[in-house]
C-alpha cells in the first residue's frame, strides 16, 4: 500500500508517519511539507509543495491520503489565515487527490465540528467535513478527537492546563470527551486505511479511538 500524509510535522501527523514507516503493509510513504525536515525514516519521502497548488503527480489511485493539517487562530494570526490552513488546504488536497483517482481519504477535524456552530473553530471544522463529503470518495474517514495529548513543536499554555485538568478528572469524563494521545489517533487512522472492504463515510469519535 502507498500513503500520502499532509501535515506530517504536527502532533498526530508525526506519530502517523512513524507508525506507517514501521508498518509492513505500507511500502511507500510520501509526506507533503512546506519545508523539509530532518527525516529519519526509511520509507518516508518528504516532498516540498505549495498547498495552494499541489503537484498532481504525487497522487494515484493506489494510495491512501491522510490529512492531519491543523492550526489555531492565535498561531495563524487571523481567522482568514486559520481558515486557509484548516479548510482551503485540506479541500485543495482532497480535490487534487480525487481527480487522480484516490479512493480513501482520512482527515482529523474536532469533536465539536458543526458547520452551523457559532464557534468559528467548530464551524470551519464542520464546513470541511461537509465539503469532503460532497466529493464522494469511495471511503471517507472523519476523525473527531477530543483534546489531544502529546508533545507539540510549539507551546500552548491553554492546552497544557486543559490536559492536566482532564487527566485529573478523567474518571468523571465520558469516553468521547476524555483527552486522547496523538498516538491513539494515528493508530486509528492507520487501522482505517487497512479496512479496504469498508466504504462510504465513517465518523470516528474520540471514544472509538481508544
Image (cartoon, helix red, strand yellow):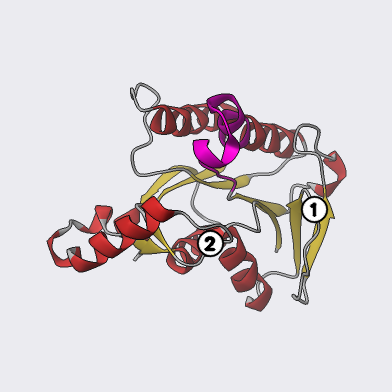
The residue shown at (29%, 64%) is 164
The residue shown at (17%, 63%) is 169
Task: Please identify the quadrant where the C terminus is shown.
Answer: bottom left
Earlier sequence position, callout 2 versus callout 1: 1
Q: Is residue 24 visible?
A: no
- Residue 118, located in which quarter of the rendered image? top left
Residue of label 2: 152
Q: Find out whether residue 72 is within the magenta segment.
A: yes
Horizontal and vertical percent position of residue 171: 15, 67
Left or right of 32, for residue 13: left
Q: Find out whether residue 135 is within the magenta segment.
A: no
Neighbour class for label 2 at 10 Å: few (<14), some, many (≥20)?
A: some
Residue of label 1: 35
Horizontal and vertical percent position of residue 197: 52, 55
The residue shown at (27%, 58%) is 178
Left or right of 65, for residue 41: right
Amino acid at each position: 500500500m502507498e500513503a500520502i500524509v499532509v501535515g506530517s510535522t504536527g502532533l498526530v501527523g508525526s506519530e502517523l508517519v512513524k507508525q506507517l514507516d514501521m508498518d509492513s503493509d505500507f511500502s511507500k510513504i510520501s509526506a507533503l511539507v512546506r519545508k523539509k525536515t530532518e527525516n529519519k525514516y526509511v520509507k518516508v519521502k518528504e516532498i516540498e509543495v505549495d498547498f495552494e497548488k499541489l503537484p498532481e503527480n504525487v497522487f494515484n489511485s493506489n494510495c491512501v491520503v491522510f490529512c492531519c493539517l491543523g492550526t489555531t487562530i492565535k498561531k495563524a494570526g487571523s481567522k482568514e489565515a486559520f481558515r486557509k490552513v484548516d479548510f482551503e488546504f485540506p479541500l485543495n488536497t482532497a480535490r487534487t487527490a480525487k481527480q487522480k483517482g484516490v479512493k480513501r481519504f482520512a482527515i482529523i477535524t474536532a469533536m465539536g465540528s458543526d458547520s452551523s456552530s457559532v464557534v468559528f473553530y467548530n464551524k470551519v471544522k464542520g464546513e470541511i467535513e461537509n465539503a469532503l463529503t460532497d466529493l464522494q470518495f469511495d471511503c471517507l474517514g472523519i476523525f473527531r478527537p477530543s483534546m489531544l495529548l502529546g508533545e507539540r513543536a510549539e507551546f500552548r499554555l491553554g492546552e497544557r492546563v486543559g490536559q492536566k485538568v482532564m487527566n485529573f478528572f478523567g474518571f468523571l469524563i465520558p469516553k468521547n470527551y476524555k483527552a486522547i494521545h496523538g498516538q491513539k489517533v494515528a493508530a486509528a487512522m492507520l487501522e482505517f486505511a487497512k479496512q479496504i472492504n469498508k466504504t462510504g463515510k465513517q465518523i470516528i469519535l474520540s471514544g472509538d479511538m481508544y
